[in-house]
Each structure stands twice: as structure tokens, then as C-alpha cells.
Image (spheres, rainbow, N blue to C red):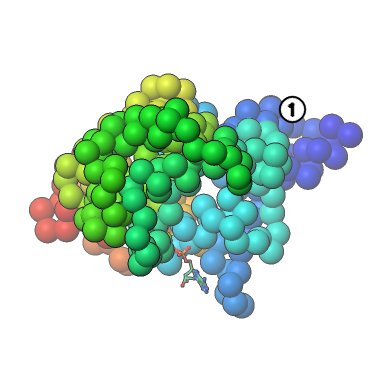
Amino acid sequence: MAVELARENGAPAGSTESRQHLQQSPLAIRGLTVTYGEKPAVFSVDMTVEPGRMTAIIGPNGAGKSTLLKAALGIVPPVSGRVQVFGKPLNSQRGRIAYVPQRASVDWDFPTRVIDVVMMGLYRELGLLGRITGRHRAAAKACLDRVGMGDFATRQIGQLSGGQQQRVFLARALAQGADLYLLDEPFAGVDAATEKAIIAVLKQLRADGKTVVVVHHDLATVGEYFDNVFLINTRKVAEGPVAQAFTAETLQSAYGGRLATAQVDQLATAPTSRHPQTGGAL
Ligand code: ADP
Ligand code: MG
């Protein structure tokens, strides 16, 4: 039975260590392949997210980063592979995961107040027909305060700037009270104040023992923001602590010709310094 389980998880058969690691991981993915058409978007990927850490998912455009998160959440079906959340099947753990999608994928063309967006994060607590009470409103307001958007509670979400909307979506994720936070490019196209506010909230979540996984496009801030990295280009390229897995070699391998060698060296050896021309963003 034990051996069977290990095989199912993709760990070496009989490896007690791998099995325990898998069970404790907030997100463990084994042999995941996703295709939209003929070509795989994600191919045979293993990922083991470490608890209580901030992990960046990094790779070029079209590398399968968003697809990896969506498959981890069951939003897109995999061709093959297995996802475990806190050592259990995804379906039994959904309430413990909060997800902030890539901003461009959300279109607010009907009037919705900011506070109502945040209260969507409470739906598990409320149920479909639950009555919203003052306590729920206060909880949602507290989450808005945490992202510095408390003054915007009654504004229409569609009237906010992209950065402000992004903070509201983070507040909605906070309202869920999840243990695992998955964010897809939360810093893309946001203002500096928003970036600072978001990173402060994520670091606080980590201090509270939560696990944070972020698809991240700005290579220059990886060393400053994250503990671990997961490099992907359809296949996994590297995974582990920044100092070990975010190197000139792994970057070159993930980005190929898309990064100049000089740039790779600079980013990998001094990850917190911004590249003068590109700001490190790709
Ligand atoms: P990333 O987030 O790293 O930019 P994606 O996961 O969005 O990459 O996309 C990976 C690949 O899958 C790309 O080649 C992309 O064009 C393709 N793809 C993504 N979403 C879809 C979709 N809904 N239908 C068809 N192809 C898709
Ligand atoms: Mg993406």
C-alpha cells in the first residue's frame, strides 16, 4: 500500500522521505501535463512548494506559468498528473486556497462596489443564500484596510486604477482566510505604491505562517522579495532557494536567447539591482 501510494504520487517507489515531503507541502504537483491544442503548454512538471515561504514562478511569456497555476486550482484539466494540496486531493482543500488571477483576465463592465468584491471572498462562510451582516462588512472592510484601500469601499471597482483594483483583489483573497495564496503577476503594470503595499501584505502573510506563490515577471526584484524560485519553460527548469536555483545557468536555460548574457550575469549575481534599461522586467 505504501509503495503503491508513493508510485501514484510520482515519488520514487518506497521513498518514505519523498512521501512525507509531499504530504506536508501546501502544493505538490507530479507529472503535470496540460495541452490546449496539440502542443503542451506545461509538460511533465513536478513542483513541491515549501510551507511558510514565498515562491516566485518565473519564465518567459508563454512558458506555461498561468497554466500551471490554473491546473493547480483545477480551472484547466490536465492531460495527466496529480495535484495535492496540504497532502490531500485538491477538492477537499479548496477552501484553503486563495487565487488572484492575472488582471487582464477580469473585466468589470457592470457596476460593483469595492466592498462587494471583497465580500465575494467570504462566500464560503456565507454560503449561497447567507445573509450579509455587519460582522461580514466589518471583516471585508478590515481586509481593505490591510491593502490600504479602506477609503474606497463604496467606490465602483471599474472606476479604480489597475493598481487599486489589484489591491482590492488581494483584499478579496485575504477575506477568504486561506492558508495558500496563489497570485498571477500581481505587480504587472501597477504603480510603485501598490507594489509596496502588496509586497508588505504578502510578507505579513508569510510571517503568519501562510504560503505564498507568485507568478513574477520582474527578475530584478526576485532576490529582494522571494525565498524560493520555480523556473519554467513548458518543462521545469529549476526549483529551490533563490541562491541555488536562480543562477545565470538556470536563467539562460529558461529564457534561452531572450536574455542577453550580460543581463543574465547581472541579475543572477545581484538580483536586487535593477537593470538600467529594462528594469529587469521581461
Ligand atoms: P504564461 O503565463 O507563462 O505567459 P500561459 O500559461 O498563459 O503562459 O500559456 C502557455 C501556452 O499556452 C502559450 O503558448 C499560450 O499561447 C497557450 N494558451 C494559454 N491559454 C490558452 C487557451 N485558453 N487556449 C489556447 N492556448 C492557450
Ligand atoms: Mg501568464
Residue at 41% of width from left, 52% of height from top? Answer: 184
Q: Nearer the viewer, residue 271 or 120?
A: 120
Residue sitting nearer the eye, 217 or 171:
171
The image quarter in which residue 81 lies: bottom right
Residue 57, can we see it?
no
- Judged from this view, the residue extending furthest toward the top is 208
Task: Give residue 44's position: percent from left, percent from top.
Answer: 62, 57
From this view, report whether residue 178 is shown above or below residue 275.
above
Specify whether 80 is left or right of 123: right
Q: From the top left corner, tell me how far across and down residue 254 is, in percent.
A: 41, 57
The type of residue carrying mark 1 is Thr
Give the camera-side residue of 141 and 163.
Answer: 141
- Residue at image location 33% in from the left, 48% down from the top: 114
Q: Residue at x 70, y 39 (%)?
A: 92
Q: Is residue 15 above or below residue 72?
A: above
Q: Which quadrant is home to the C terminus? A: bottom left
Residue farthest to the left, as pictured: 276
User: Label 1, on which residue?
Assistant: 16
Quarter of the rendered structure image containing ligand 2: bottom left
Relative vertical location of residue 270 with respect to residue 184 in this rendering, above or below? above
- Residue 157 image point, x, y percent: 31, 54
Mark 1 is surrounded, within 10 Å at the Cα level, by few (under 14), some (14 to 19) or many (20 or more) other residues, namely: some
